[in-house]
Image (cartoon, helix red, strand yellow):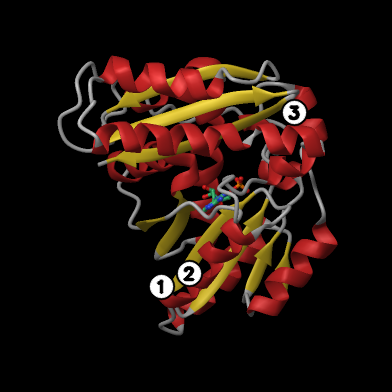
């Protein structure tokens, strides 16, 4: 596995691959890799001839510096996991390489960035869209893979790719969960054993909602009430949002007609967890 740390270095490597007729599949991450990330890398190996994984904890998308500072990192372990999988290139640029001193450009994806996480994390999706656009210009991939765990992020990236004519296939992969249902996340490492137990209410709430739909009790209000009941059972859980929305526009829905996204964000202690399910 080649490790590249500079913009020029990855651009040169990618150009060579393209000239050799190879297709490039790309998986952007913030590291502290788990099975959710690794599932994207395996899928990328099916999508392209060569696979680039980036690890970059993007300061521009953190709206709280404490969250950036405490974000878990383990470069050596990540390197080992990616090497084992047969990743071709690990792109690990330092922040000064991605954001040189006079950097002043940002990408704003307007409507789809506004609800859900966008409403609680000002500037977050501007940071995400900007860094992903920059990474696309560095890696020049034919396809890029993202996890449905970050459903709104996928919607923002898909919109940006369409609006700005990036010639890149966006592939969205399903959420990988722990055996007990908790969606895998790098942030889970910051949960205490007691908080880890409490966090199960999130996937339980998603399942409860799906059961409501299956039993035809499907007014939006009754589903949200059932979700809040499950999430509210433990005082250690603070609900940031629990919302039913259209899976394409992410606009809130008052009535269920067709597949509907249930998106949840909660705080357990000082760890923020998100999860979602498209209710059928
Ligand atoms: P992150 O390192 O959290 O920025 O995530 C990098 C990529 O991995 C994003 O496309 C995420 O949506 C995806 N991802 C994170 N957790 C999971 C998961 N549990 N299942 C599937 N994909 C995931």
Q: How far apart are marks 2 and 3 (CA)?
A: 29 Å
Mark 1 in CB contact with mark 3 (< 8 angstroms)? no
Q: Do the residues labelled 2 and 3 touch (CB within 8 Å)?
A: no
State which quadrant residue 214 falls in. Answer: top left
Residue found 75% across the figure and 23% down from its top: 269
Q: Nearer the viewer, residue 39 or 157?
A: 39
Contact check, label 1 and label 2, Cβ < 8 Å = yes
> For residue 108, what is the image quadrant?
top left
Q: Going 70% across and 52% down the picture, which residue do you hit? A: 31
In the drawing, does residue 152 fall left or right of residue 127? left
Give me the residue at 58% from left, 67% from top: 52
- Percent position of residue 183, x then y: 57, 46
Depicted 176 relative to depicted 10: above or below: above
Identify the element where label 1 is drawn.
helix
Farthest bottom residue in view: 20
Q: Mark 3 points at which residue?
A: 67
Query: Which residue is situated farthest in the left direction here?
Result: 257
Q: Could you tell which of marks 2 and 3 lies nearer the N-terminus? A: 2
Instruction: Give x and y (percent) for residue 30.
Output: 67, 48
> Residue 160: x, y in percent?
36, 39
Quadrant in which the N terminus appears:
bottom right
- Quarter of the figure with residue 193: top right
- To which residue does mark 1 refer? 47
Q: Is mark 3 on a helix, strand or loop?
A: helix
Mark 2, residue position: 44
Q: In this view, does 33 lie to the left or right of 52?
A: right
Gap in angstroms between the C-alphas marked 1 and 3: 33 Å
Residue situated furthest front in the rendering: 215
Q: Is residue 122 visible?
A: no
Q: Is mark 2 on a helix, strand or loop?
A: helix
Distance between the Cα atoms at labels 1 and 2?
Answer: 5 Å
């Amino acid at each position: 596995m080649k490790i590249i740390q500079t913009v020029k270095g990855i651009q040169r490597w990618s150009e060579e691959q393209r000239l050799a007729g190879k297709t490039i599949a790309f998986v952007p991450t913030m590291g502290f890799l788990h099975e959710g990330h690794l599932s994207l890398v395996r899928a990328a190996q099916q999508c392209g001839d060569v696979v680039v994984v980036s690890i970059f904890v993007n300061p521009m998308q953190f709206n709280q510096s404490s969250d950036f500072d405490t974000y878990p990192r383990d470069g050596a372990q990540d390197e080992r996991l990616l090497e084992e999988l047969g990743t071709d290139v690990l792109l690990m640029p330092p922040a000064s390489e991605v954001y040189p001193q006079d950097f002043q450009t940002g990408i704003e994806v307007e409507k789809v960035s506004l609800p859900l996480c966008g409403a609680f994390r000002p500037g977050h999706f501007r940071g995400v869209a900007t860094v992903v656009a920059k990474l696309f210009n560095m890696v020049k991939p034919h396809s890029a893979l993202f996890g449905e765990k970050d459903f709104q992020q996928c919607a923002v990236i898909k919109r940006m790719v369409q609006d700005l004519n990036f010639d890149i296939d966006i592939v969205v992969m399903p959420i990988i969960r722990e055996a007990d249902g908790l969606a895998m996340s790098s942030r889970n490492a910051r949960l205490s054993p007691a908080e880890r137990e409490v966090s199960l209410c999130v996937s339980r709430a998603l399942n409860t909602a799906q059961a409501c739909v299956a039993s035809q009790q499907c007014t939006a209000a009754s589903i949200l009430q059932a979700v809040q009941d499950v999430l509210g059972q433990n005082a250690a859980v603070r609900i940031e949002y629990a919302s039913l929305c259209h899976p394409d526009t992410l606009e809130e829905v008052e009535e269920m007609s067709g597949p509907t996204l249930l998106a949840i964000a909660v705080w357990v202690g000082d760890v923020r967890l998100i999860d979602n399910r498209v209710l059928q």
